[in-house]
Image: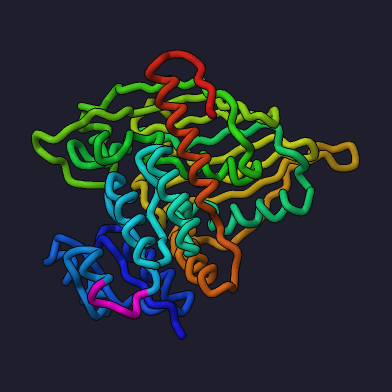
Amino acid sequence: MAVKVGIVGAGGMADYHCTGFRNAGADVIALADMAGERARAYAASRSIPKVYDTLGAMIAGEPELQAVSVITPNKFHKQLVLEALEAGKHVFCEKPPALNAAEMAEMAEAVKKSGKVLMFDFNNRARPESQAMARYIKDGKVGRINSAQASWIRRAGIPGFGGWFTTKALSGGGPVIDLVHMIDLALYFMDYPEPAWVLASTFYDFMDNPAFKGPWGMPDTAGGVTDVESACHAFLTFKSGQSLIIRNSWAEMNERELVSVVFQGQKAGGKVERLFGIDGIDATCIDSCRLYLEENGNQVNQDIITEKDETMGRTKTAANFIETIEGKAKPLNTPDQALRLMHIIDGIYESAASKKPVEIK
């Protein structure tokens, strides 16, 4: 029988989740959102039969419900994930996993007790070029990755002023935690090594300048809070001896938006990159995947051609969640990895605040 799924939150990511679940053969049977009018309109557009105000009401009203998808501001991830797990449901949650590592630790403990599947929407792992590169790494063509550089740099990409994205109490931070994807992808390629130390700086320029607002995100909120960083640069070391340079920004003086992971391995280097068009929309972007090799005494650049995925892996990650529940696939990410990632995020913010290196324990 098809897995029965309920979605919490009718925001922009709901369409990707819904499509991915259905692509994997699941039934999306309900939607929960306190914004009733928006929820009913979205449910009607995607033929979702039932609409509820809260997750609790949806769980009570849908006894066949097996899995829950959480698409809310970051502040509510932990409480909704815990509520669903305690009710015996599998959970797929938007990124970032939580506001901090302490919250993620609670979720990791809860999922162990529940025996259910908990995954997060680290969709860039599922991009065709990322999976192609991961296969080369797994096959041994790259060797151990000694160092990597993870970048998500926006020139003008603040996702609205005064909304939950720019309110630290709701989001947990700015581009460090919002654009966490390339950090996660670099760690994925590096086999998620155990972190040791981080040295970071955060910057707050342009956070009051409307010229640096992005073409997507949320409408501005008059009188709202804007207390998160606009950019961060960090250097991370691992107990294995590997290292990672991190560059994340919503607003910074760059040539253009750049999304990439570059790495240097013992046998080969590589790059997975996504270049956005001038409008910042996925359909206009160019994806690339390249290996840097030495062959027959020659320095060789090897382009890897993959299919184009305008969803940036979002529907494939959602489908993987269903396939994992059914035992048809291995999960693309795990709670233990999410916990390690959140410890790194905490370390970045702590180092930036103290202006000193921070040991990650």
Residue 135 found in image quarter: bottom right
Q: Judge whether residue 310 can be spotted in this image.
A: no
Residue 310 found in image quarter: bottom left
Tell me residue 326's x, y (percent): 53, 74
Q: Which residue shows up at 25% across the image and 62% down it?
A: 10
Q: Is residue 86 magenta?
A: no
Task: Note whether 182 is above or below 81 in the view shown.
Answer: above
Q: Please give the range of residues in magenta.
A: 60-65
Q: Quadrant of the C terminus?
A: top right
Task: Note whether 306 is above or below 270 in the view shown.
Answer: below
Tell me residue 83's x, y (percent): 31, 59
Task: Note whether 346 is above or below 189 in the view shown.
Answer: above
The residue lying toward the viewer, choosing from 181 and 331, is 331
Tell me residue 36's x, y (percent): 13, 65
Is 205 on the left-hand or right-hand side of 219? right
Q: Which residue shows up at 20% across the image and 27% down it?
A: 208
Q: Give the residue furthest to the front.
A: 113
Q: Judge whether residue 233 can be spotted in this image.
A: yes
